[in-house]
Amino acid sequence: MVAGAALSDDLTDTQWLCELEEIGEVEGFFSPLGDNHAAIFVDRSQDVLFVSFETLTGVRSTSETGLPLGFDVCERRGWSHLTVLATKDRWFRDRHVYAFFDRMVDDAFFEDFDTVIFYGAGMCGYAAAAYSVVAPGATVFAVSPQATLARRMTEWDDRFPGVRRLDFTSRYGFAPDMLEAASAAYIIYDPSEVEDAMHASLFRGTNIHHTRYRRGRSGAIDADFRAMGLVAVLSERAANGNLSPLTIAKSLRSRRRHIPYLRALLARLMQEDRHYLAALLCRRVLADRHLPRFQSALAMAEQKLLEAGKTPPGHQANQSEPA
């Protein structure tokens, strides 16, 4: 029933949730979790369970189908999927969410699946790491997650002042500790985003692997992963037992043809006055396709190099790149 389904952009948030509830009642279950959260489970095979944490606003603004990520990743693969949805930015710190996962553990829900995969970005990356403890042996993908927002540990992060009153010291609180039982956890972040990099450094352990991805805040990285199909690709490799830091690095090569990523890379190189590298990037991109922005940037970068008395790449045979 769900394959190929889509929810209209014209629905109000209340109507959208009602439509999602109907899908859950037919395909698995839908559970309101207090006033600010809900969970929808779609029952397919017992081979793989994909667990994602998302926000209502995020789903409705990023998904082409108007459905949570699990529908896009899992339906064609016959995987089961569980989405924990937040209607407010409360980092899933809510007794109703705790109680939901407690019930799932008591019912041995996660034990029914051969492979369990958790995914989330930013606030949802925090939750994916924190709640993965309910499924020992799970694989976790957390994009730019916060380790905690407990003030005594993260005074340096002033991005979320309204959340400081939430309790990050009780159950499921400190996300890095909750990963001890995971088979592997992959922390994907932009090292140039200082706060994100500092949070990433708090995730430590032999089963925790850090992947640098220069793209900006969690939303941009998450958008790239979805657009390039990397969430599905990496999840398949996890399910097949073929996932490692090396295979992730190889998978990330697909960003070399992803225009939003290339535009962001070009903007950073131009901002940093790295004109030689900017010219090399533009020439590489323009060899594949004609993009006016990169054509203009190439002309600008070459002009800057000439003004500085340097030879642009490709203007002289057998030249080597300057140090």
Image: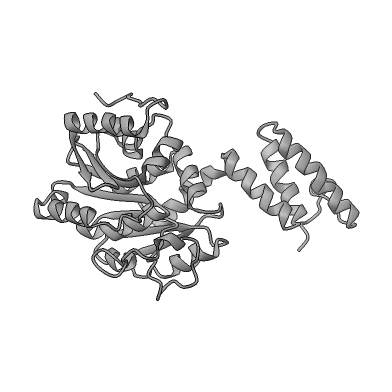
- Residue at 30% across, 58% down: 93
Compared to residue 179, the image places residue 315 above or below, namely above
Q: Compare residues 231 and 132 and report the one nearer the observer.
A: 132
Position of residue 15 measured from the top left corner of the image (x, y, whole percent)? 31, 29
Q: Position of residue 72 (x, y in %)?
A: 35, 34
| 192 or 228: nearer the viewer | 192
- Figure coloring: one colour
Could you tell me which quadrant the C terminus lies in? bottom right
Residue at 54% in and 65% down:
194
Give how far across and how far down residue 195 sits, in percent. 51, 65
User: 95 or 71, which lies in front?
Assistant: 95
| 75 in relation to 37, above or below | above
Q: Is residue 46 above or below residue 136?
A: above
Along the line of sight, the residue nearer the viewer: 303 or 153: 153
Relative image position of residue 223 (x, y in whole percent): 48, 43
Tell me the quadrant of the picture where the N terminus can be found: top left
Residue beneath the point at 26% across and 31% down: 18
Say left or right for 237 vs 1: right
Relative to 47, 153 lies left or right: right
Residue at the left extreme of this rendering: 107
Q: Is residue 96 left or right of residue 14?
A: left
Q: Quadrant of residue 94?
A: bottom left
Q: Which quadrant of the structure image shows residue 138?
A: bottom left
Q: Residue furthest bottom?
A: 152
**Residue 21 shows in this picture:** yes
